[in-house]
């Protein structure tokens, strides 16, 4: 099983390590500022009622991100 | 050495931010991530002497308050809580423009000690813009409860600016902060803010742009930082520089 997934597909409660950000420009800058840096840890906390945005725990803060942005973030699931 | 904003009296406080300060009042900007105790510290320092409104032309709340300490009167400006000064939200634009173009005498960055790594992003960005920075490590009680210890001395050395542990909710650390503010205003504290050096190619381009910027706006603002933003392709910054150039004739008379 491939343990690498785009962040928006990381199941609730699951922890992962950031592999690469494919976003460009401002979107990239924003995600970096929020703490999605290569090798940093991220965990899916919960889904919003419509499934978008999704709340993630990143470096100790819970932050809601939209799928349009997180689909370009590749993470590796940590078991 | 070039003229600093303080010595030339240059500032866009009134024009751009509609901030009225009394002649001898010192301006302090309060920055920080959301939920780090910014409002709590603001209230501690200013008590009832505050007033809130909006930033000119923005739907972002602006709180200003005054206080006195030792020989000085201060105007404290509560900036919007942000994780960064670079991305494209109105809050970040307001915070950034104020720190860069408002030329506060001191910028305080309040940080959450329980997740310092996240908070240091903003700290480093502020250190890139201005020399007169004080970092407050708030929520030290929570950090202690979670078994987190922070080597304050080491952090101070690395960042090159004063670092003050506090528990704003209990008023702890306020005295040390006020004394540090007082010393910084009196120039008894010399800071050596941590600044990134980029790769050679980037540094060369920065130097080129910086030369041109200096011709245009002089030494009043941090031209290195402005050059870096121009490389980012930041259009908002370009607009702000434009305003400055238009204001320049006015400030030259003051110089
Ligand atoms: N435990 C603890 N809580 C604090 C401290 N400082 C502020 N708080 C609490 O943290 C919450 C957010 O504070 P606030 O000042 O509104 O943060 P702001 O969003 O940065 O303006 C409030 O519930 C405060 O009472 C502190 O030093 N320790
Ligand atoms: Mg607040």
Image: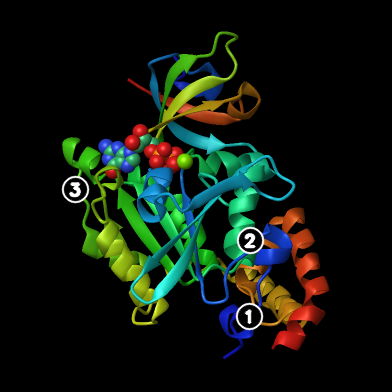
Residue A77, horizontal then vertical, whole percent: 41, 23
- The response on whether ligand 2 sits within 8 Å of label 2 is no
- Residue name at image x 44 percent, y 20 percent: A44
Query: In the rendering, which numbered label is found on residue B9?
Result: 1
Chain of the residue under the numbered disc 2 shown in the image = B
Whether discs 2 and 1 lie on one chain: the answer is yes
**Res B62 visible:** no
**Label located before the other in sequence (1 or 3):** 1
Inter-mark Cα distance, 1 to 3:
42 Å
Inter-mark Cα distance, 2 to 1:
15 Å
- The response on whether ligand 1 sits within 8 Å of label 3 is no
Query: In the rendering, which numbered label is found on residue B149?
Result: 3
Give whichever of A76, B245 is nearer the camera: B245
Inter-mark Cα distance, 2 to 3:
39 Å
Residue B166, horizontal then vertical, whole percent: 26, 52
| Marks 2 & 3, CB-CB < 8 Å contact | no
Give whichever of B69, B149 is nearer the camera: B69
Residue A1, horizontal then vertical, whole percent: 44, 14
The residue most toward the top is A49
Above or below residue A66? Residue B7 is below
Q: Which of marks 2 and 3 is in front?
A: 2
Above or below residue B121? Residue B133 is below
Whether discs 1 and 3 lie on one chain: the answer is yes
- Residue name at image x 52 percent, y 69 percent: B130
- Element at label 3: loop
The residue most toward the bottom is B1
Chain of the residue under the numbered disc 1 shown in the image = B
Give whichever of B13, A74 is nearer the camera: B13
Query: In the rendering, which numbered label is found on residue B19?
Result: 2
Above or below residue B191? Residue B100 is above
């Amino acid at each position: 099983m491939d343990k690498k997934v785009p962040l928006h597909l990381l199941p609730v409660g699951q922890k992962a390590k950031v592999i690469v950000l494919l976003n460009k420009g401002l979107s990239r800058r924003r995600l970096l500022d929020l703490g999605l840096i290569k090798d940093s840890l991220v965990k899916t906390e919960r889904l919003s009622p419509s499934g978008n945005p999704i709340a993630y725990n990143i470096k100790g803060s819970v932050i809601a991100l939209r799928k349009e942005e997180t689909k370009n973030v590749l993470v590796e699931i940590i078991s | 050495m070039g003229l600093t904003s303080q010595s030339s009296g240059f500032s866009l406080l009134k024009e751009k931010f509609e901030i009225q300060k009394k002649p001898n009042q010192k301006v302090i900007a309060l920055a920080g991530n959301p939920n780090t105790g910014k409002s709590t510290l603001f209230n501690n320092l200013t008590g009832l002497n505050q007033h809130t409104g909006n930033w000119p032309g923005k739907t972002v709340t602006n709180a200003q308050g005054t206080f006195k300490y030792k020989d000085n009167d201060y105007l404290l400006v509560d900036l919007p809580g942000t994780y960064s000064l670079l991305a494209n939200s109105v809050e970040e634009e307001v915070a950034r423009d104020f720190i860069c173009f408002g030329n506060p005498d001191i910028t305080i960055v309040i940080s959450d000690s329980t997740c310092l790594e996240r908070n240091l992003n903003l700290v480093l960005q502020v250190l890139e813009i201005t020399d007169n920075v004080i970092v407050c490590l708030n929520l030290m009680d929570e950090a202690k409860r979670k078994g987190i210890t922070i080597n304050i001395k080491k952090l101070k050395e690395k960042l090159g600016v004063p670092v003050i542990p506090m528990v704003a909710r209990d008023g702890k650390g306020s005295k040390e902060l006020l004394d540090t503010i007082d010393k910084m205003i009196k120039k008894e504290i010399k800071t050596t803010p941590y600044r990134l050096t980029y790769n050679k190619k980037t540094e060369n381009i920065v130097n080129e742009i910086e030369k041109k910027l200096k011709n245009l706006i002089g030494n009043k603002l941090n031209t290195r930082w402005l050059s870096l933003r121009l490389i980012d392709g930041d259009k908002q910054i370009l607009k702000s520089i434009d305003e400055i150039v238009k204001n320049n004739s006015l400030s030259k008379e003051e110089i």
